[in-house]
Image: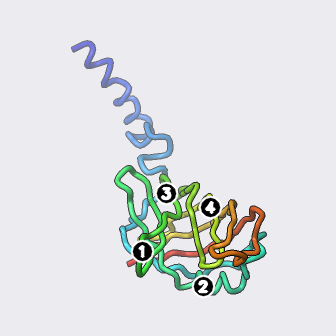
Amino acid sequence: MKKLGLLVAPVLLALGCGGIDSLFDGGIDGGVTPFQVQSANYTQSATSTVSTTCGVIDPVAAQTALNGSQRHVYNDAMGNLCFETVVTSGQPVLIGCGMVSFNKGQLKSTGIAFNDGKCQWTSSTTIDITVTAKNTIKIDKFSQDRSQWGSVTAGSCSQVSACNVNWSATLTGP
């Protein structure tokens, strides 16, 4: 009984000094209302001007193409939120996965191969996100480093050096 008292005493003290929430450094939810993110296809909007050092990317055309694009958002069953491309044929491509805590997170992917019909490259992506409401995700910063450039067919790609693409946007789901 004495051992039980030693275990219970700190909890009772915490309850007397501000409640059980005080045991969790700022409350059980950190003082933040957690928003639900359902697994579904999300529509991208409010894409910022695309900033890039890649000579083969037209920033205006890229911004236009990104607005209205679809992203599949899902939980990978290991506690990570993931984004991937939505395709009409073939396999979707992982864009990034990562933990989200207190409605903020960083999703990452490395060594993903891409092909736009002219050029092929390998990318590493970091996406800083904030969940702002139920099924609404703000991409605070999308940053993709592209390297290992090559032509799909001989001479079709003029990009040879590593480069970077950055933008921000909003994803809205069901």
Task: Give the SS element for disc 3.
Answer: strand
Reading the image, the residue beneath label 3 is 97
Depicted 117 relative to depicted 29: above or below:
below
Please indicate whether residue 74 sits to the left or right of residue 112 in the image. left
Task: Give the SS element for disc 1.
Answer: loop
Reading the image, the residue beneath label 2 is 65
The residue under the point 53% across, 64% down is 95
Q: Quadrant of the C terminus?
A: bottom left
- Badge 1 or badge 4: first in the primary sequence: 1
The mark closer to the camera, 3 or 1, is: 1
Q: Quadrant of the N terminus?
A: top left
The numbered disc on residue 122 is: 4
Task: Give the SS element for disc 2.
Answer: helix
Q: CA distance from mark 3 to mark 4?
A: 17 Å
Residue at the extreme front:
154
Q: Amino acid at mark 2?
A: Ala
Closer to the camera, 78 or 117? 117
The mark closer to the camera, 3 or 4, is: 4
The mark closer to the camera, 1 or 2, is: 1
The residue under the point 28% across, 19% down is 5
Q: Please state the horizontal and vertical placement of residue 33, each as a whole percent of the image.
A: 44, 60
Q: Amino acid at mark 4?
A: Thr
